Amino acid sequence: MQLLRPHPGTRGRTLAAEELLLLAPMDDDADTALTRALDAGGFEFERRGPLMDLGCVDQSLPALSALLTGRIPPALQSRVKGTMASAAEADADLSAALLRAEPLPVFFEQVEVAWARAALEDGWLFSVFQPIVEARTGSIFAYESLIRAQPPGTDDVIGAGQLIHACQRLNLYHQLDQRARVTAIRSAAALALGETRLFVNFSPRAIYDPAVCLRGTMAAAEQHGVSMGQLVFEVQDLDQVESRERLCCVLDHYRGKGAGIALDHVDGSLSSLEYLAELLPDYVKIDQTLTSAAATSRGGRRRLEAVAELARRLGVRVVASGVEDFDQMHAAMECRADYLQGYLIARPASPPEPMRPEVLRLLLAA
């Protein structure tokens, strides 16, 4: 198994110092293989009924992971389970520890991403903002908020992709989704972004009850003086939507509170066009791949024109995202995109970066 490396700055803080590593072989063959591997690596352990207590091994976890996954045959690795427990819990009730134990490969991967719990609970999260500008005037129409994390006392910044992966492995994705929205509102208010619209990403698969999941977002908006009318919820992960009917209910709930809706990653595929026609968002964000293709091929240009034309007929405004060079910007403008977003305009930052002067001059001259 290939393990994910802990993010720089998280090693040594992954686990509480008093936590013990408990391993549970599920049969005699697994017990024998585990015992031989631990002996070969010089790891001492104490037997606690069916469990092997290795004590506090936080700093040794990478070496232990390599040892066990290297010496225990793959067929037996799933028959050894691992968990962490406090010393008090281990002394009082081993049954609770056994209930949450995971097979060895899963356990080690979860340990490697355990820093994500601290990211959610200990104030590591912050937002960066990327401007969305009007194609006709170059004025800033909105900012998209993007989540980041920074371990205390370090210069390391953890990107959204790594955060999402870690939280998915720990079944914390819906908590990340909720806290990212609250963080976006709080950060925007702290930067005094005024009444500019704020695009906030959300994943429908993280919403189990829109009334409950929106409660924290609404409270944060009220606390920081951000109206619901300023918020635009940007739908992610369309390919993982299990029920379109349920998604429509979630979006209707948000609309009922005054928020706008944006459909992200529309690439001209049949499924993305079906979502556009069925959901009727306020904004459609053209996927970066289509923006790029429109600048390099006739087929890409025709697909972008077709998406933009359908959006106009439906009364949906078009955001060309992923604009990274002037050819892409011109292609988007020629296809009559309403708004532009991408590294050519400005990179995500906190506070937001100003628009590049040469881009503004071209927009004003168009």
Image (cartoon, helix red, strand yellow):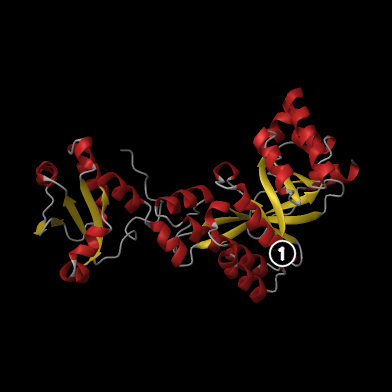
State the residue lying farthest toward the top.
Answer: 298
Eyeballing the image, is 157 above or below 291? Answer: below
Left or right of 38? Residue 145 is right
Q: Is residue 83 left or right of residue 257?
A: left
Which quadrant is the N terminus positioned in?
top left
Position of 231 compared to 112: left or right?
right
Residue 93 occupies quadrant: bottom left
Question: Residue 16: x and y, percent?
Answer: 30, 65
How many residues crowd mark 1 within 10 Å: few (<14), some (14–19), many (20+)? Answer: few
Residue type, mark 1 in image: Gly
User: What is the total number of numbered labels drawn onto the structure image?
Assistant: 1
Going 81% across and 44% down the picture, which residue do you hit? 314
Query: Which residue occupies 61% across, 73% down?
Result: 219
Above or below — where is 200 with respect to 122? above
Q: Is residue 215 left or right of residue 334?
A: left
Q: Is residue 24 visible?
A: yes
Seen from the viewer's position, the closer of residues 260 and 361 is: 260
Q: Describe the element under mark 1 as helix, strand or loop.
A: helix
Q: 140 or 297, which lies in front?
A: 297
Residue furthest to the front in view is 245
Residue 239 pos. (x, y %): 57, 41
Identified at 9% across, 58% down, the residue is 47
Dividing the picture into quadrants, the one containing residue 13 is: bottom left
Say if 106 sits above or below 288 in the image.
below
| Residue 199 visible at all | no
Residue on which the image places disc 1 = 256
Residue at 78% across / 50% down in the picture?
133
**In terms of depth relative to the viewer, which is nearer, 364 or 332?**
332
Residue 347 image position (x, y, % from top left): 66, 49
